[in-house]
Amino acid sequence: MVISKKLQDLDLQAKTDLKEVFDSFEEIAFINTQRVLEQFQKNRVSESMFASSTGYGYGDAGRDALDNIFAGAFESEAAFARHNIVNGTQAISIALFGVLRPGDVLLSITGSPYDTLSEVIGNKTKNGDGSLADFGIDYDEVPLKDGDIDYSSVEEKVKKYGKRVKMLYIQRSKGYENRPTFSSEKIGEIVSFCHKISDACVFVDNCYGEFCDEHEPTYYGADLMAGSLIKNPGGGIAKTGGYVAGKKRYVELASYRLTTVGIGLECGATLDEKRDMYRGFFLAPHVVCQAKKTAAYASYIFTKLGFETYPSYTEQRHDIIQTVVLRSPEKLCAFCEGIQSSSPVDSFVTPEPWDMPGYADKVIMAAGTFISGASIELSADGPMREPYIAYFQGGLTYESGRLSILNTAEKLL
Ligand SMILES: *Cc1c(COP(=O)(O)O)cnc(C)c1O
């Protein structure tokens, strides 16, 4: 890899200019590591807990302890983490179907949820697949206003539907939208508002947010949240899976959707996955910090090269996503090619835009990862639509992230 003089100079300058923000990221990782480690100790984790269980998985003490560790680290009443939740969409789905009943209204207050949720929510004209709409659960949304919650419109909608509103839905991370990500603390304020005007369950799609702030939304009062283990809380080690955390009753309801009513968390063989889930969760605060450093570094380099980037490299980060506005399909493809070619796995592959299940536009993805599609590992993706934004996230180590950004910048130049 040949790095031009211009980039070498920027790389050197980044060391000084990013020092302060890196220090703050490391402090957050320290605080989160402390809380996770305390939970390991409190739950008396021992090697025997990593042993696999099969069949019904009755009496799997390691599975139960891991659930408690998730609950404790997220400062929530209860939680479960399972390798057989296939992705974040399913984890969220489990929470929605667990809590909502026919006649209820699901009200999203952060605009449209992440693309893959639209089929879960469904609509009245396309029946038969078993979406929420199929089960008579109505959906409505309040778009963000100037990047913030439109409080008066939320209040209006809550008045309009009355007691039928059983869940208020918040997405923490920007996802594929060009909008700010909400901090856990900010979500806390939103949750307080929600609890004032409604007794609905306040749910948070926590994907990409875990361990970015000192606390999770559940600490600030969110009733239920869910996320993916091939993102932040898997620490790059968990091979697959998802989690749900929150108030005891809501987690219990979700657990009946995970397995079945009457069984809940009593069953579920963990096969050989627990050691990776434990180790991944232990590493997660550190790995998230590596990803945040990589993101801030990318923002720095691409800003200096004249691109718009969000968030800026000076800002605190509440998720691991970095966006770079590329403004042309060619540049978006070149960006993804740059990331792909500097990956440890599949570096020789050229990414191409394709129709992904669950997404409206074609999406181009770069992911040279040890775990297929894991976005806590360095990966970039972007829907092929204006203004051609690369959503960039992950990085198991800052060193490899830095190398990758340099390589990608060189390609774009
Ligand atoms: C990743 C993500 C999801 C879930 O996506 P999966 O690919 O199913 O894991 C949901 N919401 C947000 C904001 C996400 O980033």
Image (cartoon, rainbow, N blue to C red):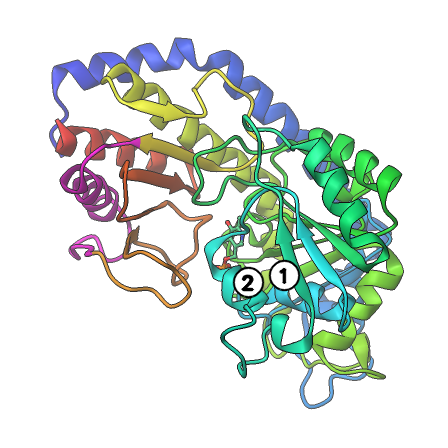
Q: Position of residue 340 (x, y in %)?
A: 24, 48
Q: Residue furthest front?
A: 160
Q: As rendered, which of 261 and 97 lies closer to the eye?
A: 97
Q: As rendered, which of 376 and 286 lies closer to the eye?
A: 376
Q: Quadrant of the N terminus?
A: top left
Mark 1, residue position: 92
Per the image, label 2 sits on a secondary structure element best described as helix
User: In which image quadrant can residue 139 be found?
Assistant: bottom right
Mark 2 Cα shell of 10 Å, populated few (<14), some (14-19), many (≥20)? many
Residue at 54% over, 79% down? 127
Confirm if mark 2 falls within 8 A of ligand 1. yes
Relative to residue 21, is residue 51 drawn left or right? right
Residue at 73% over, 88% down? 56
Q: Position of residue 328 (x, y in %)?
A: 18, 36
Q: As rendered, which of 304 and 27 lies closer to the eye?
A: 304
Proximity of marks 1 and 2: CB atoms separated by less than 8 Å: yes
Confirm if mark 1 falls within 8 A of ligand 1. yes
User: In which image quadrant can residue 176 be found?
Assistant: top left
Residue at 28% over, 64% down? 355
Q: Which mark is residue 32?
A: none
Relative to residue 130, is residue 7 drawn left or right? left
What amino acid is labelled 2 in the image?
Answer: Thr
Q: Which mark is residue 89?
A: 2
Residue 332 lies in the magenta-colored region:
yes
Mark 1 Cα shell of 10 Å, populated few (<14), some (14-19), many (≥20)? many
Q: Which range of residues does the magenta coloring cover?
A: 325-352
Per the image, label 1 sits on a secondary structure element best described as helix
| Residue 239 shows up from this direction | no
Residue 271 lies in the magenta-colored region:
no
